[in-house]
Image (cartoon, grey):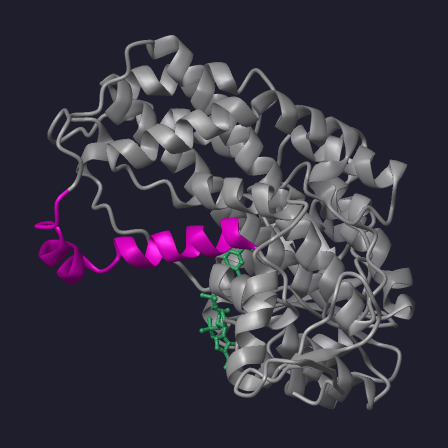
Amino acid sequence: MTDASSTPALANIGVVGLAVMGSNLARNLASREGNTVAVYNRSRSKTDELVAEHPEAGFIPAFSYEEFAASLSKPRTAIIMVKAGRPTDAVIDSLVEVFEPGDIIVDGGNAYFPDTIRREKAVRETGINFVGAGISGGEEGALTGPSIMPGGSDESWVTLGPILKSIAAVAEGEPCVTHVGHDGAGHFVKMVHNGIEYADMQLIAEAYDLIRRGTGKTPAEIADVFAEWNKGELESYLIEITAEVLRQVDAETGKPLVDVILDQAGAKGTGAWTVQTALALGVPVSGIAEATFARSLSSHPEQRAVAASLPGPDEEFRVDDVDGFIEDVRQALFASKIIAYSQGFDEIRAGAAEYNWTIDLGAVSKIWRAGCIIRAQFLNRIADAYAEQPDLPVLATAPYFAEALTRGQAAWRRVVVAATQAGIPSPAFSSSLAYYDGIRAERLPAALVQGQRDFFGAHTYKRIDKEGTFHTQWSGDRTEIEAEDTH
Ligand SMILES: NC(=O)c1ccc[n+]([C@@H]2O[C@H](COP(=O)([O-])OP(=O)(O)OC[C@H]3O[C@@H](n4cnc5c(N)ncnc54)[C@H](OP(=O)(O)O)[C@@H]3O)[C@@H](O)[C@H]2O)c1
C-alpha cells in the first residue's frame, strides 16, 4: 500500500480482469508492503469503480493495454483473472503485443492444464514468460490469502515468487505457495486439488446420510457430531462448514435448511477433468470418480423419478448402538479420506512423470494447509510422509496412515456392510474400501482377465514362473506358445 505522496510512477505488478476474483486479488496485492498495483479491465467501469472504492490501495489504473504496459516496471508482471477459455487467450494475445522478452504473464484463472501447456509453449516463443497459476480459496481467499499453485519457468519464479509469497495464506509461518513445476504443473495440481475436494465433500455427505438414516438424529444434532469430530484427526475446513450448514434453519419454513435445498449437486467441471486425466494416465482415483458421478446421478431428476419405483430392502434401517455406529462412521470417513488423498497424490505423481515435471509432493501438501477448501491438519501428516520417503509409491502405506487404516478397517467394513444392507448409497465409502482391498491384495483376478483377453483377442499374457510373453492356442489343442506381444 502506498499513499499519494510516495506513489512511485511504476507498478511492480498488474492485474487484468477486475471482476470479483481479480479485484480482490488486486486489493490483496496492494495491501502488502512493497507492492504497487496497476489495474486494467476490458470495460472501463469496473476499473473506475475499483479505484474509486479503494483509494487506500493506490492503484495505477490503465485504460488500454499500451497504458497498462507503460505503467509496469520491468520485468513487467501481470496476473490475468478473466473468464477461463477464449477470453484468457484474447488477453494473452493483447499482452504479448505490448510486453517484451523477459516479461511475465500469469494466468490465475481456472484453466485446464493442457491449455496452459499450449499457451506456455506459444508465449515462450516470443521470449515472454507464461505462468499458469492455480489459485484456490474463492473470493475470500483472493482477498485475504489464497493457496497458490504456480507453474512456469524458473526465471519467472525469481520475480513472481516474492510477490505471490506476499499475498498467499500462511500456515504455521509458511506462505501457501511453491513453484510447483514447469508449464502446466500448477494448473494440473490445482485440478487434482479440486478433485480431492469433490471426494472429501462426498465422503462427508455419505457420513451425514448414514448417521441421519441410521440413528434418526436431526441435522442440528448431527451438526454437534461434526463439531466434535472437528476437534480430532478429521479437523478441517470442510468438516467445520458442514456443521454450520447442518445447523442452519430456513427462515421461511423453520425447517433445517438442508431439508429445503434441492438434492441435485452442481459442478463446474474440475472433478470431471481430474477423472478424465486419471483415466488417461491409468491412475485409479475411484473416490474422486465416484464423487463426480454421485453429483451426476443426483442431477438427473427425470431418471430418479422413474427409478424411485425400484425396490430397496424391506426393513427400516435403525442402529441399536447409536454412539458405536457414529464412531464407526467417523473411522470409516477417516479411512476413506486417507484413500482419496492417496489416490489424488498418486495422480500428481503420475502426471509429473508423464509431463516431465519435478513436483515435490510434500511441498504441495504444505501449501494446501491454509487458504484453500481442503485445508486441514491432516495435510501435515502427508508432508511428514513425503519428508520421510519422497518417492513413497502409495501414500496410504506411510506409517501414520497405515496405522490409522489398521485401526479403522473393521469399523469401515461394518459401515459399508450396514449401508449396503440398508440400501443407502455410499459409493465413495465403498469404492475406497474396494481400492484398499485391491491395492493390498496378494493376488488379483486380473489373471483371469488376462486369460479372457488372450482367449478372444490373442492379447497374450505373462507367467509368474518364467520370463517371456505367452499365448494359448485356444481353438486348437490349447498348447501354449511363447509369443511376441503385438497387440
Ligand atoms: N479459485 C477460485 O476459487 C475461483 C473462484 C472463482 C473464479 N475463479 C477463476 O478466476 C477467474 C476470474 O473469475 P471471476 O469470477 O472474477 O470473473 P469471471 O466472471 O469468470 O470473468 C469476468 C471477467 O472476465 C473479463 N472478460 C471476459 N471476456 C473477456 C475478453 N474477451 N477479454 C477481456 N476480458 C474479458 C470480464 O471483463 P468485462 O468486465 O469487460 O466483461 C471480467 O473482468 C476465472 O478464470 C475463474 O474461473 C477462481
Magenta residues, start to end: 285-311
- Left or right: 351, with 360 as reference point: left
In magenta segment, residue 64: no
**Residue drawn 80% across and 44% down?**
362
- Left or right: 198, with 193 as reference point: left
**Residue drawn 27% across and 22% down?**
214
* Along the line of sight, the residue nearer the viewer: 4 or 445: 445
Q: Quadrant of the C terminus?
A: bottom right
Where is residue 346? Give x, y as percent. Answer: 69, 54
* Along the line of sight, the residue nearer the viewer: 315 or 243: 315
Above or below — where is 45 with respect to 329? below
**Residue drawn 68% across and 74% down?**
461
What is the quadrant of residue 342 in the picture? top right
In magenta segment, residue 308: yes
Where is residue 20? Give x, y as percent. Answer: 49, 56
Q: Is residue 261 visible?
A: yes
**Total tally of numbered discs in the picture:** 0
Above or below — where is 317 with respect to 397? above
Where is residue 210? Give x, y as percent. Answer: 32, 28
Q: Is residue 59 visible?
A: no
Above or below — where is 297 with respect to 369? below
- Type of secondary structure dominating the magenta stretch: helix
**Residue drawn 61% across and 52% down?**
193
Where is residue 471? Give x, y as percent. Answer: 67, 81
